[in-house]
């Protein structure tokens, strides 16, 4: 049936749609649902949806409609995948992604289309550095942060020489750069930086090189399926007995069960840990486990949950009217997030200012054994906001 509106009826219809709280907020998840980071993407989606469910299935009185794209952690498909959500699905809010290279493409597409973007993992330093923007927020970390936290710990332990080993892309480079910065500031020296292409897992030749160099310590960034293989290979090579392994917490978070004995005793730094034993974290973990019994409540789930909390702060301030972008973003930027990790605020560049825990892998838990750095803010080098 064709609708023909008179001018007056059309005006009434427009007023009604703008003035009532019955609109739907369209959220586009651009996440990896396949490949080495597949489980991370799923945990983020679970966490986000859990928060919405806890609010009765709505945010600021609005129904939420979800759209999904599997970005495969493939940077070359980033622009096309982002535009599926922006131009085809016309989402109001973008939530993505895990891989730093893909996130760079997503951030550019979000900026070009003035779409609000919440990054629930990818740590690419540039996004809250030279590319910082008022429409972009992160509920996770910058790659620099966990590496920087561990560099100080390593120096304090008295290690003098380190080898870094990681995938050759932004997350690996920036994590190991963060480590190097604080390790060397405190008297250590990174003597070799070893890399392999993402997401390759042929670690053997590089482990042989580490055995030949004999550094005091190794620092690494790997995550997801690749991390499981690395932890097992490192233990199988016998290196654990001679060269201690330190890492950003992605090496063991959410995957301890798969890593088994090979991970026991590993020390890592991250903005989340198991067993924080705060009422807020305990409630989150109980509800997550009830809803998703097959997955542990890990850092990725927390980052997804907090992405929804950041959005809720913005939507509440504009009573659910996503067209009020400036006011919504100002509220997101100024919010205090009551996170399971501990409360945090965002820096001016949109990155969490947060504590970094030192954790030890014990059984199937990354147990907090202290705080490595309190309220660590990303330096946001090059951000002009
Ligand atoms: C990243 O590419 O920024 C990245 C991926 C997986 C992680 C952490 C960072 O666990």
Image (tube, grey):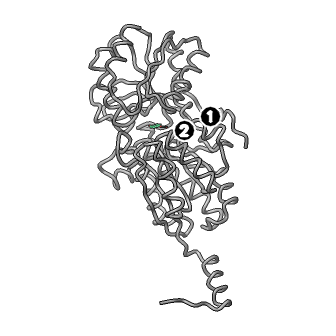
263 relative to 220 in the view: left or right: left
**Label drawn at residue 334:** none
Towards the viewer: 342 or 203: 203
Tell me if residue 249 comes above or below residue 204 in the rendering.
Answer: below
Tell me if residue 267 comes above or below residue 185 in the rendering.
Answer: below
| Image position, residue 337 (x, y; %) | 58, 49
Q: Residues within 10 Å of mark 2 (few under 14, many from 20)?
A: many
User: Is the Cβ of the residue at disc 1 closer than 8 Å to that at disc 2?
Assistant: yes
Q: Is mark 2 within 8 Å of ligand 1?
A: yes
Tell me if residue 302 comes above or below residue 311 in the rendering.
Answer: above
Towards the viewer: 119 or 246: 119
| Image position, residue 276 (x, y; %) | 45, 38
Towards the viewer: 16 or 315: 16
**Label drawn at residue 141:** 2
Residue pictured at 56% horizontal, 30% vertical: 144
The residues tagged by marks 1 and 2 sit, at their Cα atoms, a distance apart of 8 Å
252 relative to 79 in the view: left or right: left
Q: Which residue is mark 1?
A: 378
Q: How many marks?
A: 2
Residue pictured at 44% horizontal, 32% vertical: 249
Q: Secondary structure at mark 2?
A: loop
Q: Residue 216 falls in which quadrant of the image?
A: top left
Residue pictured at 35% horizontal, 50% vertical: 289
């Amino acid at each position: 049936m064709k609708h023909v509106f008179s001018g007056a009826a059309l005006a009434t219809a427009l007023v009604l749609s703008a003035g009532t709280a019955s609109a739907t907020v369209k959220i586009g998840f651009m996440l990896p649902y396949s490949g080495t980071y597949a489980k991370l993407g799923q945990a983020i989606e679970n966490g986000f949806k859990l928060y919405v469910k806890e609010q009765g299935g709505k945010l600021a009185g609005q129904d939420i409609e979800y759209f999904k794209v599997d970005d495969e952690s493939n940077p070359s498909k980033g622009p096309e995948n982002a535009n599926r959500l922006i131009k085809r699905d016309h989402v109001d809010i973008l939530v993505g992604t895990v891989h730093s290279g893909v996130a760079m493409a997503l951030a550019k597409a979000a900026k070009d289309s003035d779409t609000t973007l919440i990054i629930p993992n990818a740590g690419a330093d540039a996004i809250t550095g030279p590319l910082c923007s008022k429409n972009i927020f992160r509920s996770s970390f910058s790659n620099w942060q966990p590496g920087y936290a561990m560099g100080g710990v390593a120096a304090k332990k008295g290690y003098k020489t380190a080898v870094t080993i990681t995938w050759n892309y932004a997350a690996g480079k920036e994590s190991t750069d963060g480590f190097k910065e604080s390790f060397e500031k405190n008297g250590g020296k990174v003597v070799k930086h070893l890399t392999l292409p993402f997401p390759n897992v042929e670690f053997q030749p590089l482990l042989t090189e580490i055995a030949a160099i004999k550094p005091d310590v190794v620092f690494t960034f790997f995550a997801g399926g690749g991390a499981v293989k690395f932890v097992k290979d490192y233990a199988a090579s016998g290196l654990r007995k001679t060269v201690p392994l330190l890492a950003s917490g992605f090496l063991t978070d959410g995957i301890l069960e798969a890593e088994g004995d090979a991970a026991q005793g590993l020390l890592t730094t991250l903005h989340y840990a198991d067993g924080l034993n705060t009422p807020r974290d305990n409630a989150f973990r109980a509800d997550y486990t009830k809803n998703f019994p097959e997955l542990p409540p890990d850092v990725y789930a927390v980052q997804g949950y907090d992405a929804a909390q950041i959005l809720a702060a913005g939507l509440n301030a504009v009573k659910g009217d996503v067209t009020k972008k400036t006011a919504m973003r100002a509220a997101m930027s100024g919010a205090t997030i009551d996170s399971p990790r501990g409360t945090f605020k965002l820096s001016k560049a949109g990155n969490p200012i947060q504590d970094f825990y030192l954790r030890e892998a014990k059984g199937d838990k990354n147990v907090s054994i202290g705080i490595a750095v309190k309220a660590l803010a990303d330096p946001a080098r090059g951000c002009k906001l």
